[in-house]
């Protein structure tokens, strides 16, 4: 029995506990339902998030465990179960740090912040939830973007208002604003402030009560009253802003310029209501504007005559410059002709004197002295030829035969001659570039230039020294080309350096001038460097000097690079040879100088050639276009009659394509060269020339 009673009590207690649990569950469900209903209907956004930390316990992301509809509306996407970096990868670091701090410290926080990823402002409350180890927080926030924007607009408006008030106060303090008015149009009541009243000598009390408009208009200058009335009527009729300048009589009885600025406001039915405004003192501004207008008028008048005055001044400067150039030209010509006359008169004296004595001795039968006078005349003739050669080189008019030249080989071939010339007291060494490009240059003229530079270097070292001959490849860029007065491109450089006395800058500046020399009288013509300069420029290159007193001089010749292999040197003809003609070999000689034609035809006749003469290009071309045999054309380049030697040869080669041509000239002719080189089957011989050189060149061309 007692056992049955105990069992009964246990069942009743169990049933009571079950009933209590069910009631509790029902209450909990009802509470959760109410809570969910509140969350789903409340306007505030709510979410529970789990904050993710890295190994250094720094927050790096957070995931949405729960989010109410308001939250999803704010975010524009269903966030449940998603990490924030999935849809906002550029979210500011501030949000991670703030939520991480709440999850880690369990301290709630409230703040407002701008989320750039959403382009909105949020008011946020963040509180920790759950167990600390879960790192979960609940966040409640509202979108306060509209409020923040309204506040920002209000602040901007207040700032603008303050700025406007400050400007008005500054204008009043500076006297720019004379005063203010208010015109009530329906009652025609015109009131003004104290500043307005004082400016016009009116009673301030009356100004506050109202002044008749006629009394105000009476202060306006009579000439401006009609225009003012029209401006007021137009502003009242159309409403809106008003501005007008006119003169008024102020308290001191004088008229001043003012500007009235105001605004006419209309009712909705178009009835004019009010016309407030301010008066500005523009007297000083008008005075400045008048001065400006006067200055503009004067400037226009000046501009109209400026061009004429500039033209006149330019003409004066050009005339002065032309006179200066002419003076410099005459000075240079005087220097050139003076030196030339001195040297040539000496040479002509030797030639003419030798010829006179030869004639006298022949008439006397004293033939044993003839050889002495003949040698003197020939020596003077050679020196005269060398002088003209240097003059032509200086003026860039010498006859050149440029070809691809191995400059290293040329230098090596000149070393023995250079060492013999400079003597044992001067050490000569070379610094040659191993991969030197060929140069497009006349090798014989380059040899002369190199020898001249070495002689100058020797003369600068009277007590002995060292000469260095150096070759190198040079690429001249546009900037360096501008400094060195030469086209940009690729060049070969040939430098001659000495350890001599050097030159001061004023001497370097004149070093290339003709007949300028620092050597004692009779020890130099002053044409050496000028000849090298002219040769380099004519070859398409340049020459530059670097010198320091007591430390020596370096002269560098720049020569254009030759694209291709260097030409092989041809064996020089034997000296003193007199090769004779083949059977029937015929040479046409064309020269406008009878003495030259006579000498050439006599030499050719002595060698067994048949010589045919012509005095000009037309006569020579007539022979060449006939059926006559012509094995070689020997012609001057400069011929009278409108047809030069090169043109005649080109015309003849149309019908005689294999015609050999020897040009004899004492002056450089650009027409001789094609692309900087002589055409095949053509050669040039510079006047004056030796008879054996003419004979060898004739035989060489005909046999070739």
Image (tube, helix red, strand yellow):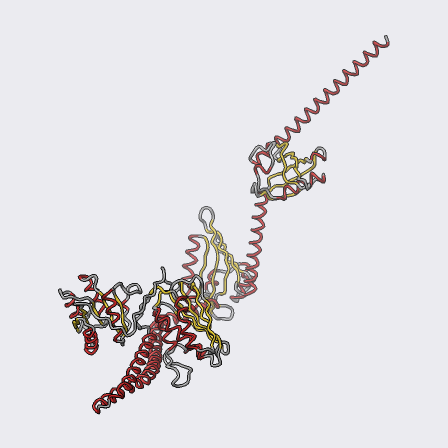
Residue furthest to the right in view is 2
Q: Quadrant of the C terminus?
A: bottom left
Rendered position, 147 above or below 414: above
Given residues 276 and 78, the one toward you in this image is: 78
Rendered position, 68 above or below 222: above
| 390 sits left or right of 24 in the view | left
| 443 sits left or right of 648 in the view | right
Residue furthest to the bottom in view is 364
Q: Position of residue 75 (x, y in %)?
A: 57, 36
Q: Position of residue 508 (x, y in %)?
A: 44, 77
Residue name at image x 47 percent, y 61 percent? 260
Given residues 22 and 704, the one toward you in this image is: 704
Number of marks in the rendered image: 0
Residue 422 sits in which quadrant?
A: bottom left
Q: Is residue 311 visible?
A: yes
Q: Position of residue 314 (x, y in %)?
A: 35, 74
| 574 sits left or right of 210 in the view | left
Given residues 89 and 604, the one toward you in this image is: 604
Q: Is residue 547 visible?
A: no
Residue 460 sits in which quadrant?
A: bottom left
Residue furthest to the top in view is 1
Q: Position of residue 353 (x, y in %)?
A: 27, 88
């Amino acid at each position: 029995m007692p056992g049955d009673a105990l069992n009964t009590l246990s069942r009743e207690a169990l049933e009571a506990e079950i009933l209590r649990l069910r009631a509790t569950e029902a209450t909990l469900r009802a509470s959760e339902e109410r809570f969910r209903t509140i969350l789903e209907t409340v306007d505030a956004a709510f979410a529970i998030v789990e904050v993710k930390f890295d190994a250094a316990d720094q927050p790096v992301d957070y995931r949405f465990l729960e989010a109410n509809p308001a939250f999803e509306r704010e975010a524009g996407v269903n966030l449940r179960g998603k990490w924030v970096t999935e849809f906002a990868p550029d979210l500011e670091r501030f949000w991670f740090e703030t939520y991480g701090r709440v999850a880690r410290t369990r301290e709630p926080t409230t703040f407002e912040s701008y989320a750039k990823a959403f382009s909105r402002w949020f008011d946020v409350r963040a509180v920790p939830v759950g167990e600390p180890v879960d790192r979960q927080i609940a966040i409640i926030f509202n979108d306060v973007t509209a409020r923040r924007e309204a506040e920002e607009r209000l602040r901007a408006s207040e700032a603008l208002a303050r700025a406007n008030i400050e400007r008005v106060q500054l204008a009043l303090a500076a006297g720019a604003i004379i005063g203010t008015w208010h015109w009530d149009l329906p009652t025609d009541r015109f009131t003004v402030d104290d500043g307005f009243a004082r400016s016009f000598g009116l009673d301030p009390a009356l100004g506050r009560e109202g002044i008749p408009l006629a009394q105000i208009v009476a202060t306006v200058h009579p000439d401006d009253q009609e225009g003012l009335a029209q401006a007021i009527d137009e502003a009242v009729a159309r409403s809106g802003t008003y501005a007008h300048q006119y003169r008024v009589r102020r308290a001191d009885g004088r008229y001043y310029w003012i500007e009235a600025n105001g605004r006419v406001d209309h009712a909705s039915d178009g009835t004019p209501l009010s016309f407030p405004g301010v008066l500005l003192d523009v007297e000083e501004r008008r005075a400045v504007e008048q001065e400006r207008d006067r200055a503009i008028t004067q400037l226009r008048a000046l501009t109209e005559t400026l061009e004429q005055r500039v033209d006149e001044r330019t003409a004066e400067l050009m005339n002065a410059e032309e006179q200066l150039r002419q003076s410099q030209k005459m000075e240079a010509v005087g220097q050139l002709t003076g030196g030339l006359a001195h040297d040539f008169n000496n040479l002509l004296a030797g030639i003419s004197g030798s010829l006179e004595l030869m004639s006298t001795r022949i008439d006397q039968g004293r033939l044993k002295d003839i050889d002495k006078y003949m040698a003197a005349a020939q020596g003077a003739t050679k020196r005269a030829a060398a002088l003209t050669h240097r003059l032509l080189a200086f003026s860039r008019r010498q006859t050149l035969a440029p070809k691809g030249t191995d400059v290293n080989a040329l230098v090596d071939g000149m070393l023995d001659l250079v060492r013999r010339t400079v003597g044992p007291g001067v050490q000569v060494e070379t610094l040659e570039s191993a991969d030197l490009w060929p140069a497009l240059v006349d090798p014989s003229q380059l040899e002369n230039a190199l020898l001249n530079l070495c002689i100058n270097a020797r003369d600068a070292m009277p007590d002995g020294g060292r000469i260095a001959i150096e070759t190198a490849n040079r690429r001249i860029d546009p900037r360096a080309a501008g400094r060195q007065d030469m086209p940009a491109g690729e060049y070969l450089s040939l430098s001659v350096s000495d350890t001599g006395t050097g030159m001061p800058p004023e001497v370097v500046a004149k070093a290339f001038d003709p007949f300028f020399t620092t050597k004692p009288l009779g020890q130099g013509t002053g044409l050496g460097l000028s000849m090298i300069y002219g040769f380099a420029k004519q070859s398409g290159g340049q020459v530059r000097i670097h010198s320091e007193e007591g430390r020596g001089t370096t002269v560098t010749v720049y020569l254009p690079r030759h694209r291709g292999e260097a030409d092989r040197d041809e064996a020089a003809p034997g000296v003193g040879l007199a090769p004779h003609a083949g059977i029937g070999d015929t040479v046409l000689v064309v020269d406008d100088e009878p003495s030259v034609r006579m000498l050439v035809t006599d030499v050719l006749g002595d060698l067994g050639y048949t010589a045919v003469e012509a005095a000009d290009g037309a006569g020579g071309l007539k022979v060449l276009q006939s059926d006559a045999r012509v094995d070689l054309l020997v012609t001057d380049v400069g011929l009278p009659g409108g047809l030069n030697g090169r043109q005649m040869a080109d015309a003849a080669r149309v019908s005689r394509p294999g015609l050999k041509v020897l040009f004899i000239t004492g002056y450089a002719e650009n027409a001789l060269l094609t692309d900087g080189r002589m055409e095949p089957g053509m050669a040039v011989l510079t006047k004056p020339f030796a008879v054996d050189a003419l004979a060898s060149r004739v035989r060489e061309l005909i046999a070739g």
